[in-house]
């Protein structure tokens, strides 16, 4: 049985992690790139991202991958 405190702590931890992640849709708006292009960048490892099911979760605090730094 999961206790209420454990469940609350888990939910807080997940919420904290989720605030650091964006979807391909959000990344396309942020970086002014198409979603398909973002997905290709994710697949090729050019952005920090992990695929869960059909959804790419992208680390929000990273530079636009098409800008040379």
Image (cartoon, rainbow, N blue to C red):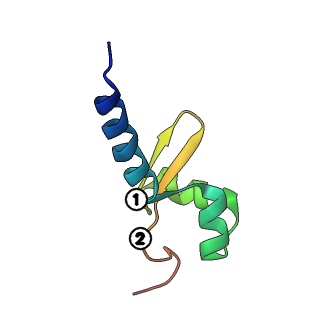
Helix, strand or loop at mark 2: loop
> Dividing the image into 4 quarters, which one contains the N terminus?
top left
Q: Nearer the viewer, residue 20 or 57?
A: 20
Q: Is residue 7 above or below residue 22?
A: above
Q: Nearer the viewer, residue 47 or 60?
A: 60
> Dividing the image into 4 quarters, which one contains the C terminus?
bottom left
Q: Is residue 6 above or below residue 67?
A: above
Circle 1 packing at 10 Å, graded few (<14), some (14-19), many (20+), is some
Q: Nearer the viewer, residue 49 or 12?
A: 12
**Of discs 2 and 1, which sits in the foreground?**
2
Q: Quadrant of residue 8?
A: top left
Q: In x, y percent, where is residue 7? A: 36, 30
Q: Earlier in the sequence, mark 2 or mark 1?
A: 1
Query: Residue pushed farthest bottom?
Result: 69
Q: Nearer the viewer, residue 27 or 20?
A: 20
Q: In x, y percent, where is residue 65? A: 48, 73
Q: What is the CA distance from the residue labelled 2 to the residue labelled 1?
A: 10 Å
Q: Dot 2 corresponds to which residue?
A: 61
Query: Residue pushed farthest top?
Result: 1
Q: Is residue 66 above or below residue 23?
A: below
Q: Dot 1 corresponds to which residue?
A: 48
Q: In x, y percent, where is residue 27? A: 59, 65
Q: Quadrant of residue 14?
A: top left
Left or right, 12 with respect to 52, comes to left
Image point 67% across, 76% down: which residue? Answer: 32
Helix, strand or loop at mark 1: loop
Circle 2 packing at 10 Å, graded few (<14), some (14-19), many (20+), is few
Left or right, 64 with respect to 8, comes to right
Image point 44% across, 77% down: which residue? Answer: 63
Marks 2/1 in contact by CB < 8 Å: the verdict is no
Q: In x, y percent, where is residue 60? A: 46, 65
């Amino acid at each position: 049985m999961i206790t209420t405190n454990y469940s609350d702590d888990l939910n807080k931890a997940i919420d904290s992690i989720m605030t650091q992640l964006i979807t391909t849709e959000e990344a396309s708006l942020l970086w002014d790139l198409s979603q398909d292009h973002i997905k290709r960048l994710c697949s090729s490892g050019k952005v920090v991202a992990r695929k869960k099911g059909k959804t790419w979760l992208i680390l929000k605090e990273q530079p636009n991958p098409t800008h040379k730094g």
